Image (tube, rainbow, N blue to C red):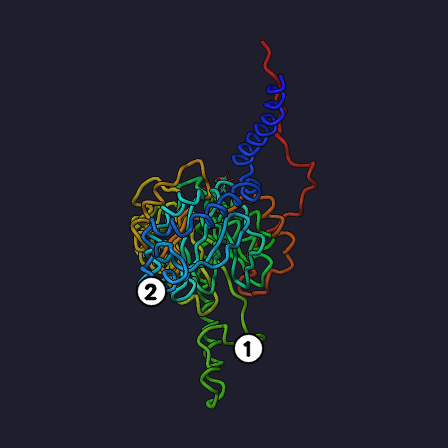
Amino acid sequence: MSDLTTLLEVGGPVAAFGGGAAYARANHPRLYWSAVGGPISTVRLLSSYASVMEACGLTVAPSRLRVLAVKATTRREVRPVPPRRGIIRPTSSGLRLRLRLAPGQEPADVAASAERLRHAWGVHAVYVSTVKPGVVELRLVGFDVLRKVRMPRKTEGGFLQVPVALREDAMPFVRDYRAVPHQLTLGATLSGKSMYLRHLVSGLAPQNVALVGVDCKRGVELAPFASRLSALATDPDEAAELLPVLVKEMEDRYDLIKAWQGIAPGTPDEEITSDIWGLPESERPVPIALFVDEVAELFLTATRKDEERRDEMVTQLIRLAQLGRAAGIYLEVCGQRFGAELGKGATMLRAQLTGRVCHRVNDEASAKMALGDIAPEAVLAACAIPAERPGLAVAGDTSGGWSRIRTPYLSLGDAADVCRETAHLVPDLSALKPFRPYVPAPLPSVERPGPAVQPRPLTD
Ligand SMILES: Nc1ncnc2c1ncn2[C@@H]1O[C@H](COP(=O)(O)OP(=O)(O)O)[C@@H](O)[C@H]1O
Ligand SMILES: [Mg+2]
């Protein structure tokens, strides 16, 4: 009898703890990681570090001095030496530690063992990055951070930088307009492109930037942000009027830069500027971000006359992409496909868009359009994105590498609220005044227009 009570007394709490841990692991991975997973992995790492490194072939033969010292002081056998390890730093989603590579090792050796390390220490994934020559950082991620995305609390985005998504290694993916002026975002319908755009718009809204939208789906995606937009075109006709104005604005900015370069013949070299960032602040025009949602709609043509208009628009976009950076004009182009079938000049425009993000696509050809020139593995990764994870994408980065990213969920209403709150920040750009979208006065929330005819239940 007493055995039974002991069993109940001990077994009950253990079972409850086990069940709670399993539940937390499935539903609150962050909590599970901080309370259970993290400490367990830390202990595993500390206790097995040397043997795991040896099993992964990351050790080197000990120096002669070390052999002598070990032999002189102890009777133990002389083991190979693992890379020197820094302190283990826990984060909300994993662990970080630095390793000093032994002579003859390179970061690629550690990266090649990442999968083995992950299994040895029981974590979701291990990523390796170079900190400086001879030192690599191991980032252990405890769980799948892209399942339910939460941006790290300390994500600082500076001017023209928007932390727009989370990378699979739990680092923020920052869209930096000054580093990558133009970007192409591809993906099948419902893959999360407009969500990505939504984050960019709401991230740039509080900054001193003019936002311009071209949304040929009659404005369904961008019209809710009308209060913060300096200009909005909702069909190809309007876009055909807006683009030349932007090109003209760009040319005016080039003239301004030229005028400043020429002011005084004795101006020191470092003060001669070739873009708007070198101008004194009082003279500097505000940067313009141009968002194009569903680019194919802009290029679709029905008649011969349309075709001429399309060719003109493509040319204007190419000019903006080629020369826009120095004038502070940045392009953000979204589409389902972006190939030669869009017409003359389309592939040339694509080549100008440096940044690439590819959401789920329906065929390999579309993924190749976005990532083909970055890496073949990136194309495969994009083709493997499942439909039930909208917002998941493969992003190429400036170093020629790529990573999986996912945007956090942001409702259209919340993004529109940000735009409404920042409406007073719309910069004064006289050229764009005629294109300023009409902003309806907000309806009192209860008086949403309902159906004109009230449905009545059918009776026979
Ligand atoms: N990161 C995300 N997390 C959760 N749901 C998302 C995410 N991104 C997109 N979605 C959902 O997926 C659906 C399609 O997204 P959307 O951005 O409109 O796709 P697209 O513009 O590519 O057609 C929307 O219902 C949206 O709420
Ligand atoms: Mg969309």
Res. 114 visible in picture: yes
Query: x, y percentage for residue 94?
Result: 50, 48
Mark 1 packing: few (<14 Cα in 10 Å), some, or many (20+)? few
Residue 450's quadrant in the figure? top right
Where does residue 263 sit, x and y in percent of width and height?
49, 85
Q: Is residue 269 above or below residue 281?
A: below
Question: What's the distance in space between the residues labelled 2 and 1, CA to CA?
Answer: 59 Å
Residue 54 coordinates in the image, percent (x, y): 34, 51
- Quick one: SS at disc 1? loop
Which residue is drawn at the image coordinates 35% and 45% (left, top)?
Answer: 381
Left or right: residue 200 compared with residue 55: right
Q: List the residue tagged with mark 2.
A: 63
- The x and y percentages for residue 279 are 52, 76
User: In the shown orientation, is residue 224 left or right of residue 361?
Assistant: right
Q: Amino acid at mark 2?
A: Ser
For the N terminus, the image quarter is top right
